[in-house]
Each structure stands twice: as C-alpha cells, then as structure tokens.
Image: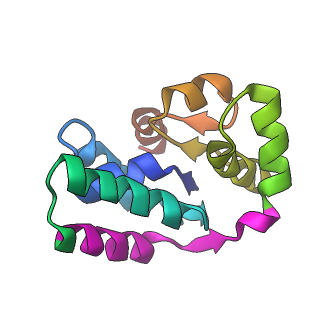
Amino acid sequence: MVIDTNVIVYALVGEPQRGEEAWRVLQSAPEIWVPDSIRAELANVIWQWIRVKEMPLEEGLAALNDAEALFSFIITTDQLWEDALCLAMEHEQAAYDTIFVALAIRRGWKVVTYDKKLLKKFPECTTHPSDYLAAST
C-alpha cells in the first residue's frame, strides 16, 4: 500500500491524537510503497517537530532512520512526476501530494492519509487510516 508522509510521521513521533492509530496502520501493512520524495518531506516535517515541539535532534535523526526501515519499495519520482503534474492541475492539489496519488493509481491501490484535502479531492484512491484499519480487520 501507499502510505502518506503524515501517517508515518505521526507514528514515529508519537503524535498524541493519531500516533497509536498510525502505528497500527504501519504494522498492518504487508508492504509500504512510497515515492522517493518522502525523504525530503520527512526531513522537513521532523525539522518542524524539532523546532516547534522541541524534539531533540537525536530523536529526529532516529525517526528518519526508523522511517527508512519501514519502506518496502521506494519509487523514483521521475517515474511519477508527469502523472502527478496532470493530477495536480486537474484537481488543484499540490504536486508533492499527487505524487503519492500517482503511485497509488499506478499500483491499483489507495493512499492511506490524514490529509483532508487529499481525501476530499481523490476519494476513489485515498482512504483515512481509521477506514483502512476497519476494512483490514
């Protein structure tokens, strides 16, 4: 399955409201497929947690290493960027988000995400983590 950055981050940093659910998603996933752009997104979000939430740098670095160990397959962005741009233009959604959607479409899967805009604009190829977990039990 394709897992959005926000699900991975919430699991790794133990986000109070969603961290436990996000971990259950990661643990139940037979495979986790992501575009290589996730590395930049994760680094940016972890940087924000370090600055705003005062997470120690060592914990941030550990979270990045833990994330890398989760990925079953990392697909290069150059395989997805044209489809992602078309989806971004068609749905007025940021292209860095539609890269995940393009990967999901290519694989015939859904993106598991907390992103409300992504869920609304791509209901046929996204799912909320709680809905994913309910369907997988």
Q: Is residue 32 magenta?
A: no
Depth check, front residue: 72 or 120? 120
Q: Is residue 69 above or below residue 22?
A: below
| Residue 23 appears in view | no
Q: Position of residue 29 (x, y in %)?
A: 47, 59
Residue at 40% across / 48% down in the picture?
7
Q: Quadrant of residue 76?
A: bottom right
Q: Position of residue 125 (x, y in %)?
A: 68, 37
Left or right side of 32 for 47: left
Q: How many marks?
A: 0
State whether the magenta stretch is mostly helix, strand or loop.
Answer: helix
Q: Quadrant of residue 43?
A: bottom left
Depth check, front residue: 49 or 30? 49
Residue most extreme to the front: 51
Q: Is residue 70 magenta?
A: yes
Depth check, front residue: 116 or 32? 116
Quadrant holding the C terminus = top left
Quadrant holding the N terminus = bottom right
Q: Quadrant of residue 72?
A: bottom right
Residue at 54% across / 35% down in the picture?
127
Q: Give the magenta part as a residue range.
A: 59-79
| Residue 100 appears in view | yes
Left or right side of 97 for 29: left
Q: Position of residue 62 (x, y in %)?
A: 26, 74
Q: Is residue 115 above or below residue 81?
A: above
Left or right side of 80 for 125: left
Residue at 46% across / 33% down in the picture?
131
Residue at 22% across / 57% down in the picture?
50
